[in-house]
Image (cartoon, helix red, strand yellow):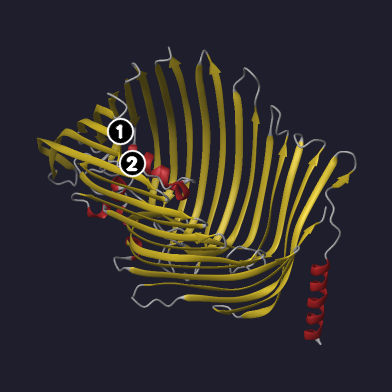
Amino acid sequence: MTGKRSIRFGVLAILVLVRGGPVRAQLQVGNDTTLGLTASASLGYTRQWGAQDSDGLTYGFDGILTGEYHDPRFLNFMVHPYLNQSNVNSNFNSSTFASGVNAQANLLSASQTPFQITYLRDYNREGTFNVPGAVANYQTHGNDQLISVSGAYFKEDWPTIQGFFSHSGTDYEVVGIPGTGTAHTNQFGLSSNYQIWDTNLNASYTRNYVNSESPVFGTQDLFLSQNTEVDTLQVGGSRNFFHKATLNSNFSRSHVHGDYASEAVDSTFDTLGSVLGLNMNSKTALSFYVNYSSNLSAQYFTSIIGPGGAKSGATTSPAATTGTAGFPNVSYTTSYLDYGANGTYQLDEHLFFTGGIDHRAQGQQDGLPDFTLTTMHAGVTWTHALLRGVVSLYSGVSYSFYPVYAFENSPGSSTLVVTGSTDSSLLGTNATASYSRAFGRWNVGASGSYSHSLTTLLVGYTQETYTANGNISRSVKDWNFSVQGSYAKSNVDSLTIADSKATSYSASVSHRNFGMSANYSTAQGSALQVGSSLIPVTPGAANSLPQYLVLFNGKSYGGGLNYRPKRRWNMTASYAHANYTTINSLIGNAPVISKSEQFFARTDYMFRQIQVYAGYNYVSQGFNLTSTVLPTTYHTFYFGVARQFNVF
């Protein structure tokens, strides 16, 4: 009897979807309120097997309610609820059935005091654990919530004032790794801008709190915790002088407190930066700069563990010295001062000359002497038309000199003392070349670079870097072809942990009704895990927290296909594979093998406002300390019908 009722309900729902309802433009409520509502309802059948077995009717809903009160500039809002959304009833390639709502309201948006409120809540959503260089990242399932409030005060001839507050929370599970990760973030900020006497002034204060507990990538029973609080006060300004010079200056004071894994963090540091640019004439320009940090190690570490760390992937690094690694009670870079000058001269439209001098002083803890470095550099750039294309060549040299210290442990103590020093120098070279040309319908480009010099901030370390890029494309009638590739490698002498390498290749073919693409990439380097991401670190950071570094080496590849046999009929498919080996000192020196394989195929046909669809999903993901990976696997087959409604 129950089965007959389900069938009857399904038939009734399909009839409602097919017939639909009246279509209206907007709904007027009273004299001041206007509403609009569009929606999509779906009904279908889903069969899932593998890690979970289930089958039966699946229904879904997706609606967008918009409105305004009195005037859209006074109040406008949007509410977007959705129920059981996945590739079963939408174009999103997901095997989960996400439900939730997101909403936003804007008050007085065109006035001197605009105000905005945003709210988001979702359940059973699909996300990713981000791995450097991967074509497709590892899949996660979890829930999210967010509420944020922002406002501003704009009055002519007065300083602007802007403020915001947001609270967010998330929980997730990496498919194939039992254990739930959680994260909570609170952010608060105030900022102001003001122009007086032709000077642009700005100031801001931000306070960020992050609390997270994440499964260590590649394990089943170990978690990495973070509980940090960062506040920063910043002031800055810029001014033009006589249309020939521009001065930009910025000062900030930050405090970071908390812990990352078992590492305690409690530090206050200041940063200062200033640049003076001079346009001497139409051919000559000079710039003078100074940068200072009272604790460069804390500054870098804060940029990674802060709320934006996992997304921004900080790229600046501190300078490591000898001594036991750790933070903050180690022999590691504290104060940092960098100042110098650069100049450019344009001989003609094809030839440019550059040059400059830079001096750096890095303070050390435990009474060790400052590390200093002075570098002079010069280069020449030539661009010109060649063989109906454009070629650009650059060649540069640098000369650096710095003292090298010898250390030994003080008798009866682990403290390092200087036993002597010698003067050292390095002649560095760097070169780049690029060429691009159009051959009829063909477009070709290639570039490459080489550099051998001291690392950007590490005193006493030399680095070699190679890069190469190429692309070729062509259009023939309705066909388009494209192939591109890139290669990058960097190694630091006496610091193998900082070596990195990445390659990437892709190709695509498209027609009016057809498209096909393929890609392949490899990545190797070191990273820190922050939440659900591995953030690549640069040479300085590789020595900052070695006990938490994740060494990664992997490859990924994939492809996609889309075809439209008829105007209303679409067919799509995609495949992605990732295979990474990681060594995480938190779980020992044994390599962890991780694999992810994802395949999606779907076809749908539109008839008026009715969509008929069918598809298949495959997700297989696993982690193991041996070469045999026992993955968690999901298979999903589905078909159904969806109906679009313009309710009002």
Q: What residue type is labelled 1?
A: Ser
Viewer-nearest residue: 256 or 28: 28
> How far from the left and from the top, in percent, is residue 385?
31, 37
Reading the image, the residue beneath label 1 is 335
Alpha carbon distance from label 1 to label 2: 52 Å
Is the residue marked by circle 2 packed among few (<14), some (14-19), or many (20+) residues within 10 Å? Answer: few
Any part of residue 311 in sight: yes
The correct choice, above or below, for 587 with respect to 170 in the image is below
Q: Which amino acid does label 2 sit on?
A: Arg
> How far from the left and from the top, in percent, is residue 52?
58, 78
Q: Residue 544 carries which label?
A: none
Q: In this view, does 285 lie to the left or right of 259?
A: left
Residue found at x 22% / y 54%? 496
Of pointers 1 and 2, the one earlier in the residue sequence: 1
Is the residue marked by circle 1 packed among few (<14), some (14-19), or many (20+) residues within 10 Å? Answer: many
Comparing labels 1 and 2, the label whose residue is closer to the camera: 2
Judged from the image, the secondary structure of the residue bearing numbered disc 1 is strand
Q: In this view, does 562 lie to the left or right of 67?
A: left
Any part of residue 88 in sight: no
The correct choice, above or below, for 50 with respect to 315 in the image is below
The N terminus - image quarter: bottom right
Q: Residue 388 carries which label?
A: 2
